[in-house]
Image (tube, rainbow, N blue to C red):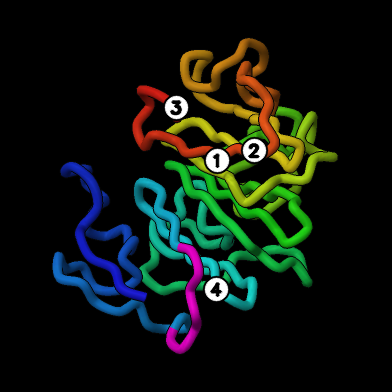
Amino acid sequence: MYSRGGGGHGSPPLDASGQLGRGGTKEPGPVEGPLRGKFVVQVVTGRYHTMAVTEDGELYSWGLNDWGQLGRPAVGATSDPGLVSLPGGVRVVGAAAGRYVSMAVDDSGRLYTWGHDGCSNGGKLPERNEAYKPKLVSGELAAKRVVEAVAAGREHAVVSTADGKVFTWGGRELLIGREGNSREPAQALVRERSSVEVECYSTSRGTV
């Protein structure tokens, strides 16, 4: 796995957030450490953190961790890839990263979230020192099988389920395509289909 670049648009923590998984440079270079020799099948990036899903179902994270978005207890930033603290036996098949939140889908279609997100707790945001712990979503999504289509934007998230429905939360009505409590997952006002792909625009201005 290779990474390059520096981050975003001049925000103070960029050069020290570790989102490249190595020393900062604009030239492509390998991400080493525990990922060395691993076959990576997916890489996702938040604003200041990165995650990688491996062929054997492991999920690694690195970068800024001010709200537990790395799924690890330390607060601050690290360029060292490390395993996300998922429950034992969980095999990850897909992931998404927002600004302060991360998500993962396991091979049974269950969705886990952690960081600055309340969808696993009835819309209530977690205590900062507990936010790193991945938890299964609650509410309308609790009994749904989530397809690998899961996406996170700057302040909202979108997932599609096996029965062709789209669920959203976070941000404002403009971003999530529905009314109601924006902190809890609920079905968006889109036509149901047998298969749906979702993606979030990376700023707070829209959803695709």
Q: Element type at marker 4?
A: strand
Tell me which numbered mark, 4 or 2, is placed earlier along the sequence: 4
User: 144 or 21: which is nearer to us?
Assistant: 144
**Any magenta on residue 26?**
no
Tell me which numbered mark, 2 or 3, is placed earlier along the sequence: 2
Tell me which numbered mark, 4 or 3, is placed earlier along the sequence: 4
- Give the residue number, with chain letter if any, for mark 4: 54
- Give the residue number, with chain letter if any, for mark 2: 160
Which mark is nearer the camera, 4 or 1? 1
Q: Residue at x 39, y 34 (%)?
A: 201
- Give the residue number, with chain letter if any, for mark 1: 197
**Badge 1: residue crowd in 10 Å (few <14, some 14–19, many ≥20):** some
- Give the residue number, with chain letter if any, for mark 3: 207
Q: Which residues are magenta?
A: 36-42
Q: Element type at marker 3?
A: loop
Looking at the rendering, in which quadrant would you find the C terminus? top left
